[in-house]
Image (spheres, grey):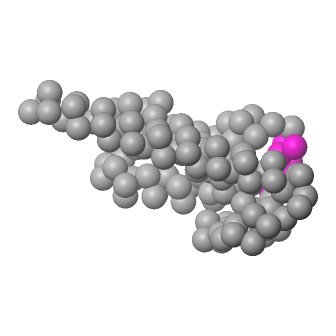
Amino acid sequence: MITVADVRAQLGEAYSTKPDDPTIQNFIDRRKEELQELIGTDPASAPYQSLLKRWLLSKVCCDVLANDLLGVDSADVLEYSLGDLRESKSQNVKLKLTWFETFKESAELALNTYFVKTSGYRAVRL
């Protein structure tokens, strides 16, 4: 569905080398599993691929940003807590948090749209 290169392209030059490719791939793999649980089917064969890709890409971008903000070098960042960072005075941290929230909202919108469209899709197929 998405690749490490897609994630790096979405995040831009600042993330062209870090975190390393295996860490990003781990994020992708874990989020694919999460997506499959959420939609109840293999995402690769589900309708509305663009919405599922948007969700996956946005969630993985959140993971990369959280990994950077928290200074964690493993995929365990999926269990992140960014609450303490909201108090930071650093403009860099604030910008990354804004990006994080934007990607999070994008993922939520994509998934909600997917469910709305597939409920209509299922009704037509019945």
Q: Is residue 17 magenta?
A: yes
What secondary structure is the stretch in magenta mostly built from? loop
Residue lying at 75% horizontally and 72% vertically, measured from the top left: 84
Instruction: Report the number of numbered marks.
Output: 0
Instruction: Decide if residue 87 is on the left or right side of residue 24.
Output: right
Residue lying at 64% horizontally and 44% vertically, measured from the top left: 102
Query: Residue 40: x and y, percent?
Result: 30, 52
Residue lying at 47% horizontally and 30% vertically, measured from the top left: 50
| Above or below for 52 versus 23 | above
Query: Residue 90: x and y, percent?
Result: 90, 58
Residue lying at 70% horizontally and 67% vertically, measured from the top left: 82
Instruction: Decide if residue 13 is on the left or right side of residue 34.
Output: right
Query: Residue 94: x and y, percent?
Result: 81, 53
Residue extent of the magenta highlight: 14-21
The answer to whether any part of residue 71 appears in the image is yes
| Above or below for 61 versus 5 | below
* Residue situated furthest left in the rendering: 126
Q: Is residue 44 magenta?
A: no
